Amino acid sequence: MEEVVILPMRCPTLIGRAEPLATLRLFVEQAKQGEGHVALIGGEAGIGKSRLVAEVKTYAMEQGLLQLQGNCFPTDLTYPYAPVLDLLRSLVASNPKLAVSVKALARDIFPLLPELVPNQAPARSDLEPEQEKRRLFALLASFFLQLSTQSPLLLVIEDMHWCDDTSLDFLHYLARRSTSQALLFLATYRSDEVQQPLRSWLTLLKRERRARQIQLVPLVRNEIDGMLAAIFEQKHTSIEMRRFLHGELLDLLCTLTEGNPFFVEETIGSLVDADDIFCVQGYWNHRAGGEISIPLSVQDSVQRRTELLSEEARRILTLAAVAGRRFDFALLQQLTQHNEQQLLLLMKELVAAQLVVEESADRFAFRHALTRQAIYRQLLLRERSMLHKLIAETIEHPGIRAARLEELAYHFYQAEVWHKVVDYARLAGEKALQLYAHRAAIDYFTWALEASEHLQRAPSPSLYRARGQAYETLGKFEQALRDYTGALNVARVLQERTAEWQSMLDLGFLWAGRDYTQAETWFRQALVLAQALDDPVLHAHSLNRIGNWHANGEQPHEALRYHREALTIFEHLHDPQGIAQTLDLLGMVSYLGGDLLQGTVYYQQAVTRFRELKDQQGLTSSLATLSLRGPTYQTDALSAAASLTEACQDAEDALSIAREIGQRSAEAYALFQLGLCLGSQGEYGRALAAVRKSLDIAEETEHRQWQTAAHTVLGGIYSGLLAYPKARTHFEQALGLARGIGSLFWTRIAAGYLASTAIHLQDSVLADETLNAVLDPDTPAETMAQRMLWCAAAELALAQKQPGQGLEIIERLNASGARETEGRSSLRVLKLRGEALTLLQRAGEAEAAFVAAREIATAQGARPMQWRICIALGNLYQVHERSAEAEQMFATARALIAELATTVIDERDDFLQAAMALLPHTRPLSPRRVARETAGGLTAREREVAVQIAQGRFNREIADALVLSERTIETHVSNIMFKLGFTSRRQIAAWAVEKGLTEKH
């Protein structure tokens, strides 16, 4: 028997509740200062109201507030003053110092708390009931307000949907008198169980503007993901566990719990208790074929509510549960033969029991998916099967079958009508793939394959292939490998040669993400088979795959030959899809081969064609790679074809599409390309977030090529932040992965990065060893990776005080850049040329190289390179006693460094210290000077004006606020636009928010 390991769970934090918590903490602080508030927290059961209150109570205790809490219960609706009396009794039990005061109050409000004054005889009151009520209100309110004068007070009433009318009146009375007291009144209620008295009370407070309404909404997917991480302490779990959490379990919880935090916790607990989540040999999975365990709390709640229903309403509820989470009124009519009026009355009964909600005149839904599951689970298996068959046959009409494929596949599958399942499940799976619903597609194709097995039919290779494609898109390598291999075996048995060729190509694609040797084997077999079949389309596709394999093997000339031959075939066949795919591959080989200009032409053509074809998968790939056209730190040894701003937009568009179609590998690819562009711009915080997410996805999906890429980009970002030890770690990981998958391109890229980092760490031995392993004197300087290696070799020569050798390498780079037309130059090569000429004391030529490099860096938005070039120029000017020009360069560098530091948090201080240390020693800057340089050179007054603009004020209003003339404000606005290079007030407002200036005012 295999050992089952249960992962310990812990209570998650208040995920998704940061904003309301911040508001309530502010109210606590204001109550401490004597400013009272009333806060009403609404939301459905389990949404997190009590947990939020608990967090506020903890904070209030830290701030020294006295805490009082009363609770309402279902039996309290007709019990006057119930929550107030509950609060007072709790106070006596928990606070002996105040017990005396409560007992004194009990004598005055007798007989409300008789147990506290057992010997007091009932006094006869001559007051009218309304007058007596006002007297009690005054006494109770006076008691609480008096307490608030002794100590700031937090008064909590929970579950006010069960509150009696008298207590509601009193609490309104208290709320009106507490706003100027050191009292925070906090109340919670279930927004889906509000009866008329509470509704009127809430409306009254809203109209009088006496309370702050806080409505808690369900968690969204990423917040449920964060909650899972907290429950399972994900930071300490394996890659396999992360893949599981981000896959089946997350989807399951999103569907079942609909973002209700309590249901998430309860469902997880139920799954663990039932061993539906278990760990075998280090892999976490949900038990295959097992039904989902419904939390006992949900089962009990549903049972209590169904017991109150009429027999016919329970029958309707059962049919609805079998129909699904959402169900049609018309379908229920067909199934029950009730007339419209009869069925409407029954539906009202279900709505009143809070089991069902009305979505439209024709459609209803269960309030929660778990509610439906709990009802469904009460049915016997035979009963379920019978009802599913009844529903399937009811909706199976020729005119509407295409619109209800998913329902037909589901109900016939549950009814085990296998001959129907084969067709409907296949069609539903194909439809799901078209809609990029890959997980749903997997279910449908699995049903179709299972049905074929029950019918003892040989399944079609296309079924295995379709499911394999869905698995591959989701990053499930083992499952995709199994299905593609299954498709290949079936194709061979059935002698379907085209399907056999397709399976070989699919296997090659699959292996390309982790092992180029395996990929080549399958691509070569596919090419041989395509030639044997004498099919030009198959032949052209095979040529493209072999060409792409050569491109990743640093053989661009061979790759171009294969791709051009494929393009000729597709153009002859007038095949638009084949042409678009080949243009994409020609763009890729051009980029990797070192020609960004020609590659961009190819990619722009490919993007246009993919848009025309509405091929989102091809489009996201082309756009993501097109982002390499800017001077990133992976491509800055080549002539850039666009600015980094344009390149970032390409990556953003690619990411949006990848997420839209749900393709995990495409999302990982777009994310690290976006991180590369952002890091090259100096937007370090955003860059780190993007690439870390990319690495997470690549590790979850075991896509080793994208893991390699993500590590190289992370290393590049840390190099930009001058955090060279961290950069070295990532580059070493990338190099190990690249060697593992057999990619010469990624091996050379990672080696080039690592060698440059080793030079900065003054480890010339490591740099030399790294370069010698992948670079020899005969290696050309043409491809992207080769040029990166030769740039690192030039840096090593300069570091070893061999400027002549370094310049020789640089001239070789210039000479080999034959494609650098129209006067374009490489940013990195220009900078290196300036450094070599400086060491050779050829100042004029060095200055020209640095100036040209600075112009490129400025125009294309490469701020990290810009400040480095400014320091190099400043040092050159300083040596030649051009002090004013030197100081100008150093000042520009300081401003850029300060500006880039604002984009990160954790690494900010280390970056500032390391970067400023590269500048000549000067007097420490004053706080005012630092603020000015960080804020783009704006004066303090100009920064104030920018903040006022961000707050939506016009010049006249700003002049009044700052006690200046309107003309002076106009001058300040003009200066701001000039210094920041803006043309509109909207740009100024966005800039002020981005810089955090508005947070200080």
Image (spheres, helix red, strand yellow):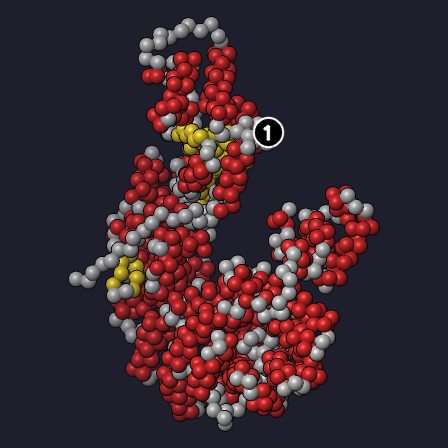
- Report the residue at 33% width, 40% height from top: 302
Q: Which residue is mark 1?
A: 208
- Report the residue at 59% width, 84% height from top: 595
Three-letter code for the amino acid on which mark 1 is drawn: Glu
Residue 939, how many percent across, how many down? 72, 55
Residue 692, how many percent across, how many down? 46, 65
- Report the residue at 54% width, 27% height from top: 181
- Report the residue at 30% width, 49% height from top: 269
Left or right: residue 350 compared with residue 838? left
Question: Can the viewer see residue 885?
Answer: yes
Q: Residue furthest left?
A: 1
Q: Is residue 89 above or below residue 239?
A: above
Left or right: residue 918 compared with residue 51? right
Query: Which one is nearer the viewer's eye here, 695 or 447?
Result: 695
Q: Residues within 10 Å of mark 1 (few under 14, many from 20)?
A: few
Question: Can the viewer see residue 171?
Answer: no
Left or right: residue 456 compared with residue 198? left
Q: Secondary structure at mark 1?
A: helix
**Which quarter of the figure has residue 81?**
top left
Residue 480, how many percent across, how many down? 36, 72
